[in-house]
Amino acid sequence: MDGKRTGVLVVAILLAGVVALPALAKNVKLPEGKKIHFTLNQTLSSDKSREGDKFSGVVSRNVRVGDKTVIPEGAVVRGTVTSVKRSGRVKGKAEMELSFDEIELPNGKTLDLAASLTELDDKEEVTEEGGVQAEGTKKRDAATIGAGAGIGAAIGGIAGGGKGAAIGAGAGAAAGTGVVLATRGKEVYLKRGTEMAIQLDRPLTVPVD
């Protein structure tokens, strides 16, 4: 009788232990190409940021597979500035390359990332290689040269009539061109709060409770 009671007690304890065990997390695989949207925590710029600088951003949209949230809002994306090129005075747009290294989930779990930049809500362009390129300055440069020509023509016209206006326009345009050549183009500028999107370069396995 005592043996039977002991056996029943052991079974009850074992069953209680099984019931008390926490549910194991299930792994959900996010496919290559899946997008993660996040908001930048720091300002990055081609004239101040340096290679090796760290940055982070907060996930701004739930990443879902079917009806399951795999990466929730509030997760943190961390990355590194890998290359910076300032704009040239004559030609060459400013560029910045970024790597996206890891993502930290709200539960503290950190996962390695392999991802590329694909979208920006700012005026900068995303290159085919996933870098950031500053917008061009052709319109600004043309306006500077045109303004110089107009001012020169006005001054020349006052001084010497039509011939003076022509000479003044040429001199003014030359001066405007000189200003353009002495001025750097626009820099890459990603302000804090910029909305960005990256896409996975390879599948990412995420443990989900």
Image (tube, grey):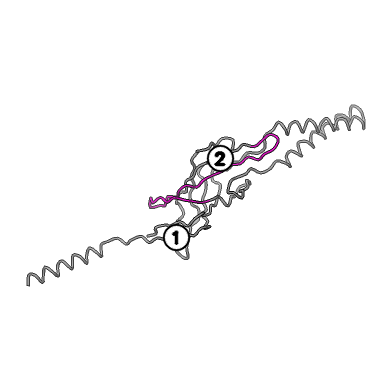
For the view shown, which residue lies furthest in the left direction?
Answer: 1
Residue 180: x %, y % from top left: 73, 34
Badge 1: few (under 14), some or many (20 or more) residues near its Cα, within 10 Å?
some
Quarter placement of the C terminus: bottom left
Give the answer, above or below, for where 9 lies relative to 76. Answer: below
* Circle 2 crowding by C-alpha within 10 Å: few under 14, some 14–19, many from 20: some
Q: Residue at x 64, y 37 (%)?
A: 87
- Find out whether the residues at labels 2 and 1 contact each other: C-beta distance under 8 Å: no
Q: Secondary structure at mark 1?
A: strand
* Amino acid type indicated by mark 2: Ser
Read off the magenta span: 87-115
Residue shown at 51%/58% (left/top)? 32
- Left or right: residue 109 compared with residue 50: left
Q: Earlier in the sequence, mark 2 or mark 1?
A: 1
Going 22% across and 63% down the picture, which residue do you hit? 17
**Quarter holding residue 148:** top right
Residue type at mark 1 is Lys
8 vs 41, nearest the viewer: 8
Which secondary structure, mark 2? strand
Measuring from the top left, give residue 61's x and y in whole percent. Answer: 50, 56
Residue under label 2, please give it. Answer: 83
Q: Which residue is mark 1?
A: 29
Cα distance in 3D space between marks 2 and 1: 31 Å
The x, y position of residue 207, in whole percent, is: 39, 58
Residue 113 magenta-highlighted: yes
